[in-house]
Amino acid sequence: MQPADNPVEFNLVNNDWAGNRYEDSHELVGFKNNTTVRIWYNHQTHGFSSQWHTALEMILPMENYYDVTVGQTSYHLFPGELLVIPPGETHILTAPDSGTRFVFLFDISMLTNIKGFAGIQPLMSSPLYITPETFPKTYPALHHILMQMKDEYFSESEFSELSITSLLLNFFVRLGNHFRFANHPFSDVQLPKQKDYIQRFSSLLTYIDQHYMEDLSLEDMAAHIGFSKFHFSRLFKQYTNDTFSDYLNRRRIRAAEELLAAPPPGVSITEIAMRCGFSSITTFNRLFKQVKGCTPGEFRSLNSVEF
């Protein structure tokens, strides 16, 4: 079945996938006019094989279902259901014979320096399946925000990117509050201490985000926010769902991804590893392949392509 033409209100010069390029399984997202946002009204009846990219992706079916596989997990999305795919996650898209959906793509690298954003990033360590059932209190607001983004994007107003960025931040804040209140990380702690613990660990994640390239030990970080290393280890795991070591390594690898994708002239992979806080190239290579599924050299060759 041939897809229908785009409705007039969704007809933009780049409202298709022609602007995107591929290097093996790596998708190079062509953002709108060198911005950090792309929203695609997709009515294609063919899917996309295994792919990944450095953009945050959100998929929202409007008519008919849409199948998405991320890693080893498959999602059968019905209209109105949202899947948030973190940057760097390999995924497969399978379309039905007819249907429409919006695909939202964001370069969120610019947001990482905003104070407090480090506390949101653990929520995106794996895909988020957002439905009226899984997020009953938060879903209406999140869905409304996406519709506002879509309207701003296709209006092509002078301030559309600024408005969409503001809406994206609001989206993240609502997600953060949802997890904070629905799945309180310190539910076993007396109420007066809960707020204090959240503030301490939120501050710590911001500190790690700014100092990941330095020699950060568990003992030093525990002392930094006033806990014994044993108490700190348990609370850190509750707050981030990661051990301190795993969290720090993931942050360093994320920084390495950015440098590998746009390497400074003459900078070797070994120097990139050192700049990101790894003291051993062997450790860097092993952890990078464990997290990304490829070596730093392979990642660099696939990513260092400019539009």
Image: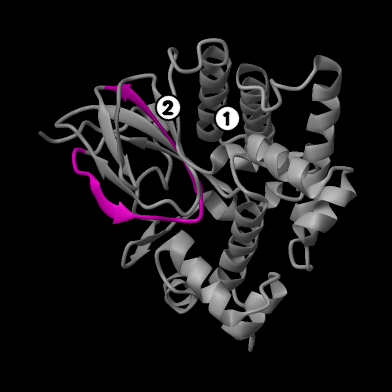
Where is 214 relative to 39, above or below?
below
- Which span of residues is magenta-colored? 45-63
Dot 1 falls on a residue whose secondary structure is helix
Task: Find disc 1 in the rendering and name its residue.
Answer: 152
Where is 53 relative to 60, above or below?
below
Task: Find disc 2 in the rendering and name its residue.
Answer: 82
Q: Is residue 296 left or right of residue 241?
A: left
Spot the residue most to the top. Answer: 137
**Whole-percent x and y of residue 299?**
45, 71
Q: Is residue 96 left or right of residue 155?
A: left
Dot 2 falls on a residue whose secondary structure is strand
* Depth check, front residue: 299 or 250: 250
Residue 264 visible (yes or no): no
Q: Quadrant of residue 245?
A: bottom right
For the point 51% across and 22% down, which residue is it? Answer: 147
**Whole-percent x and y of residue 220?**
84, 57
**Amino acid found under the numbered disc labelled 2:** Leu
* Depth check, front residue: 272 or 55: 272
Q: Is residue 58 magenta?
A: yes
For the point 64% across and 31% down, which residue is it? Answer: 172
For the point 52% across and 67% down, which residue is it? Answer: 287
Does the magenta stretch mainly form a helix, a strand or a loop?
A: strand
* Depth check, front residue: 183 or 254: 183
